[in-house]
Image (cartoon, coloured by chain):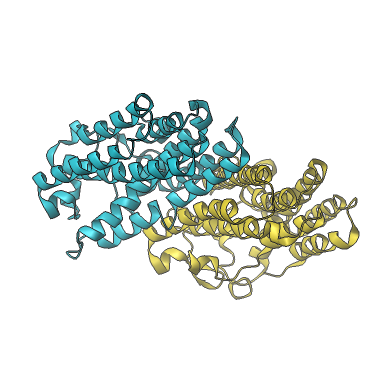
Chain colours: A yellow, B cyan
Amino acid sequence: MRYSLLAGGKRVRPALCLAACELVGGNDSMAMPAACAVEMIHTMSLIHDDLPCMDNDDLRRGKPTNHIVFGEDVAVLAGDALLAFAFEHIAVSTLNVSSARIVRAVGELAKAIGAEGLVAGQVVDINSEGSSEVDLEKLEFIHIHKTAKLLEGAVVLGAILGGGTDEEVEKLRKYARGIGLLFQVVDDILDVTKSSQELGKTAGKDLVADKVTYPKLLGIEKSREFAEQLNKEAQEQLAGFDPEKAAPLIALANYIAYRQN
Amino acid sequence: MRYSLLAGGKRVRPALCLAACELVGGNDSMAMPAACAVEMIHTMSLIHDDLPCMDNDDLRRGKPTNHIVFGEDVAVLAGDALLAFAFEHIAVSTLNVSSARIVRAVGELAKAIGAEGLVAGQVVDINSEGSSEVDLEKLEFIHIHKTAKLLEGAVVLGAILGGGTDEEVEKLRKYARGIGLLFQVVDDILDVTKSSQELGKTAGKDLVADKVTYPKLLGIEKSREFAEQLNKEAQEQLAGFDPEKAAPLIALANYIAYRQN
């Protein structure tokens, strides 16, 4: 659990969670357990996705993947335990937030993971591999579920735990959906334009696995335009908030859009 | 998810959860989502334990295991989604219970699963396979974590959600720990004394895997005596409760002790 959770990574989801909490007037201690929990969920999804029966990847964040180091059995279990510990951490360690908001946060996080979230995306992704019948709609379904749902969860949890109104929570949900898709479009572009060393993970593996990606369907240039558009629309959701407090979320959107690995 | 969750099974954990809820004065609707959630967790642990990289079992409840039917990748993901959905169901569907009690229930259930619960037991179990150095203490650690923790979770969740006092919750926790260990001692005995057909799962597999079991360490007769003692001590925890409402929990202890499959 520690090996994969503390292996580095960009910590985009925790940063989003804390920024959303502060944007709606909370202080970051209210959302810190949730921010950690979201990173645990992200890590568990990476551990399980890397398994031989899934993407069969042996490099992640520049290090051997969990099952290479600890064996497949322990890798499955480490993922399970991280998934459970995420909920334990929110339930036990969230302070100065009403129980009603904590219960809402638990429900939102759980929904981001399961058959309407990460898992849905991964199942459709697996079933689509090597298929020539993946169109833009299906590709978007995969990315919204595999990537955007958990980013949405991170932002929504932060907004709920920070005391946001329903309207604020929904605006931030739209922002998160936009940058979630943005994140994956950029990932697809990086996979075909960067080396393994630059990425800290195996490059070009989408091509090798014959995966449908945005560059494959739209070409690199149109993919970059689509990324620009998603970034712009996401940032428009932040218009009604205090500009100073919204600055980190704008910066994060730009970071996601312009990152190099 | 449906294939394994609705494949039958004894539903011991949900029954315990509802009975504990009623024992402390709740009505069973308060604990119904939690009872279902505990069964989802149990099912997810079976799906993952049956994987080729773990116990590599192809028969469960008289049917092919999940990965035999749907493939290893989907089996891993079905387990993940059931784990998440358990928490979603408690958070979203529990009615007429204070949010504070729901948050406590989430924390208790999560702790029963992770590195202090099911997963701890499975990891030590895997590492002990084929080892001649497993003594009674280690065997008890494995069973307390692999089996008793989730039964404890079921009972404690029912007691919390039903409005039990801290003292009532702790008495029921002790009862559950006792019958949790009892459950596994009886399982070990059945594995060496019954056929696959009688059990609805592969019999004699502990012997094949050279697993340390109670019958192996104590012999069949002493294992049966130990089961009797655990049953008696568990039932003693129920002495202070309304005998009529305690009757289902006494019956469940006896059912576990004297079951034939």
Residue shown at 49% from the left, 69% from the top: A3
Residue B113 drawn above or below residue B38: below
Toward the top, the furthest residue is B244
Q: Residue furthest bottom?
A: A197
Look at the image and tell me whether residue B129 can be seen: no
Please report the residue visible at 46 percent of the width from the left and 34 percent of the height from the top: B35
State whether residue B231 is above or below residue A55: above
- Residue B133 screen position, x and y as percent: 19, 65
**Left or right of B99 in this view: B188:** left
Where does the C terminus of chain B fall, quadrant-wise?
top left
In the image, what residue occupies the spot 32% across and 40% down? B237
Residue B100 picture location, percent across and down: 60, 43
Please give the count of numbered marks on the rendered protein. 0
Q: Nearer the viewer, residue B5 or A131?
A: B5
Q: Position of residue B5 (x, y in %)?
A: 42, 34
Res B171 quadrant in image: top left
Q: Residue at x 29, y 49 (%)?
A: B56
Residue sticking out furthest to the front: B240
* A125 w.r.t. A208: above or below: above
Name above or below for residue B41 compared with residue A5: above
Q: Is residue B6 visible?
A: yes
Work out whether residue B131 or residue B113 is closer to the camera in this orientation and state it.
B113
